[in-house]
Amino acid sequence: MTQRGVARTGLRAAVTAAVVVTIFAGVLPRIASYSDVWAVILTMSWPEVASMLLIAGWNLVTYWFVQVAALPGLRYRQAAVAGQASTAISNTVPAGGAVGVGVTYAMYRSWGFTPGEIARSVVVSGIWNNFMKLGFPVVALGLLAIEGGVSAALVGAALTGIAVLVASVVFFALLLRSDHLARVIGERAGRIVSRPRRLLGRSPVTTWGDTVVRFRGDTIDLVASRWPVLTLSAFVSHLSLAIVLLTALRLVGSGQDTVSWIAVLAAFAFVRLISALPITPGGVGVVELGYVAALTIGLESPERAGVVAGVLMFRFLTYFLPIPFGLLAYLFWRSNRSWRRIPDPKSGFSGSVPGNTR
């Protein structure tokens, strides 16, 4: 890594640390003291803790459904290893999302999948997940309108989500509409990328047009056969995460009269949009503050302590707890050789990888 790269990485790490420390040491204690928050958490019974762990475990499993739906031939056990490892990296490393994709690519390649299949699965699963991220605020806004709790800020955020969602759908539809449009998109993207490459003394990109055309044909086949299961699995995955948040709040005593389930769903939907910004790894600090700010408006001090306790428990189960499991998954992949396959260059896919089994 160059000195400039090291300096950039160091600066990013310093900014991340400053944001996290400011939020956890300076902002959250002003909303509710940690002693009060801990006292609320200690009121939970062991059956409640066990049920919380079960729901959080189910939430982790739902991520695998999307991966299996987007990559024909992927086993659930492979999805578990790749999903946990990439999640752990995304939650701990600056720009961890990109690094996590790289680790997922390496794992899929080792199991016999071709670069084209992997790229298609990453793009398709990413698109469906983003559709859900952008669609949930719209649903939440409708529910809030029924309840009578709509504000100008929420309307603005929902309208932004709708605009981005529509633009994403239109772009995806144009990409799949014809070979000609796909080739034009690929060639123009190649020209954009080629400009900085020339400045670095590298050759321009000339094959993206053909690559996008091939991608279009393969993606049409995948989407045509699997869009129902893609949509259902992505919806279940996002809804399960919201249920973990709601359950955590309910188990620490934040009942319907304190924070309604519609308010929780709305907070979840809009904070998920914020979490898409790579401010800190996994949105640590920023996400917690977003949930707490959205859910403690108008509450008294004891009620705020309960909300903060629920949010912190939710984040522990969905952000911190997957990290050690992800490390174990990565070490398993590095040591396990029985799943390794060599892609068949003639078929574009390793015939030795069986179909989906759970």
Image (spheres, grey):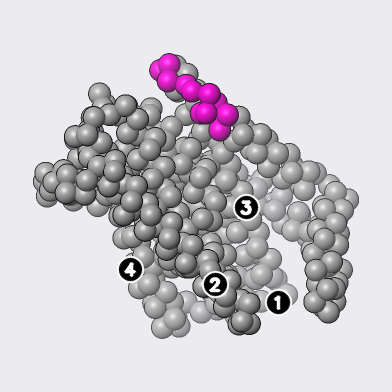
Q: Are marks 3 and 4 in contact (CB under 8 Å)?
A: no
Q: Quadrant of the N terminus?
A: bottom right
Q: Is residue 150 magenta?
A: yes
Give the amino acid type for the residue marked by disc 1 in the picture.
Pro
Give the labeled residue for mark 2: 9
Q: Position of residue 196 (x, y in %)?
A: 80, 68
Give the amino acid type for the residue marked by disc 4 in the picture.
Pro
Q: Provide the secondary structure element on which disc 2 rests.
A: helix
Which region of the structure is painted magenta? 147-157
Q: Nearer the viewer, mark 2 or mark 4?
A: 2
Q: Position of residue 90 (x, y in %)?
A: 47, 63
Q: Nearer the viewer, mark 1 or mark 2?
A: 2
Q: Nearer the viewer, mark 1 or mark 4?
A: 4
Q: Residue at x 53, y 24 (%)?
A: 152
Give the labeled residue for mark 1: 345
Give the amino acid type for the residue marked by disc 2 in the picture.
Thr
Q: Are marks 1 and 3 in contact (CB under 8 Å)?
A: no
Q: Quadrant of residue 109?
A: bottom right
Give the labeled residue for mark 3: 124
